[in-house]
């Protein structure tokens, strides 16, 4: 092989390797002028909501308004994702609403498994967790357990509000309105936003399936 052919073969090989390498590279994801990634899904869609960088930690609620209007106690179920700290109101196999929840701390974990609504009550107060007040009406314990802490003489125990209560277990675990931290912070119950829980409450009945995973 002549020197000319050797040189030509060398450059052809280098070019082929370069083109192959370029062919394997993925195109760069689009970004804004500030360098932030662009959400590739249509605004308002569920895919767009889940692709946002603050999901699942966002306090925002996503609704499929058309499907939500068709959701009722006969076709609904609830899925609770403890890892994501999100609740999903389902219509058959479709998500009608995706909302933030707050589940139990490690020492009082929310149980996992399949449960069914045992009781529905709009106005509900805990008979175990709440606040202790002394005889003068001053707060002495803001996170009291009535089975562990003694009520001050002349004072009172006030159970924590758990409005729009949906009981899931006989030992007091349920789904209700409560402070929704973006981490586990409850006494095993599943808290939900005050604007969201009345909707969830209206879409389920005694016997509705809850899957906690």
Image (cartoon, helix red, strand yellow):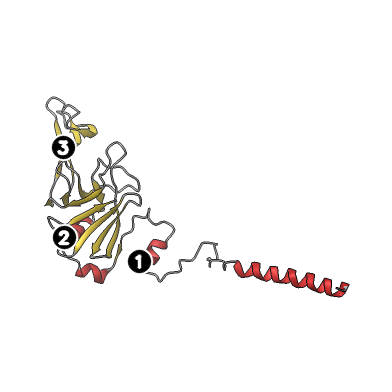
Looking at the image, residue 141 sits to the left or right of residue 5; the answer is: left
Q: 102 left or right of 42? A: left
Q: Residue at x 13, y 55 (%)?
A: 207
Spatial CA distance of label 2 from label 3 is 27 Å
Q: Position of residue 178 (x, y in %)?
A: 24, 48
Q: Nearer the viewer, residue 119 or 127?
A: 119
Q: Which residue is mark 1?
A: 46
Where is residue 91? Give x, y as percent.
23, 65
Q: Where is mark 3, residue-wise?
A: 158
Secondary element type, mark 3:
strand
Residue at the extreme top: 153
Residue marked by disc 2: 202
Task: Tell me residue 14's x, y (percent).
Answer: 74, 68
The answer to whether residue 198 is above or below residue 153 is below
- Answer with the quarter of the image where residue 48 lies: bottom left
Q: Secondary structure at mark 1?
A: helix
| Residue that appears at 36% across and 69% down | 45
**Residue contact between numbered discs 3 and 1, judged by CB atoms under 8 Å:** no
In front of the other: label 3 or label 1? 1
> Where is 160 relative to 26, above or below?
above
């Amino acid at each position: 092989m002549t020197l000319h052919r050797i040189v030509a073969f060398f450059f052809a090989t280098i070019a082929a390797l370069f083109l192959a390498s370029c062919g394997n590279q993925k195109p760069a994801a689009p970004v804004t002028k500030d360098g932030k990634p662009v959400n590739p899904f249509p605004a308002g869609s569920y895919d767009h909501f889940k692709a946002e960088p603050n999901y699942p930690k966002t306090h925002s609620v996503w609704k499929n308004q058309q499907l939500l209007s068709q959701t009722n106690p006969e076709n609904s179920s609830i899925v609770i994702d403890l890892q994501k700290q999100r609740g999903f109101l389902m219509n058959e196999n479709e998500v009608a609403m995706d909302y933030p929840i707050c589940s139990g701390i490690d020492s009082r974990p929310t149980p996992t498994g399949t449960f069914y609504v045992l009781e529905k009550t709009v106005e509900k107060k805990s008979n175990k967790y709440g606040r202790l007040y002394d005889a003068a009406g001053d707060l002495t314990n803001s996170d009291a357990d009535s089975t562990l802490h003694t009520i001050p003489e002349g004072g009172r125990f006030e159970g924590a509000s758990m409005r729009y209560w949906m009981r899931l277990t006989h030992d007091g675990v349920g789904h209700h309105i409560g402070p929704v931290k973006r981490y586990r912070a409850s006494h095993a119950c599943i808290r939900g936003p005050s604007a969201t829980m009345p909707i969830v409450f209206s879409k389920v009945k005694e016997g509705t399936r809850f899957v906690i995973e």
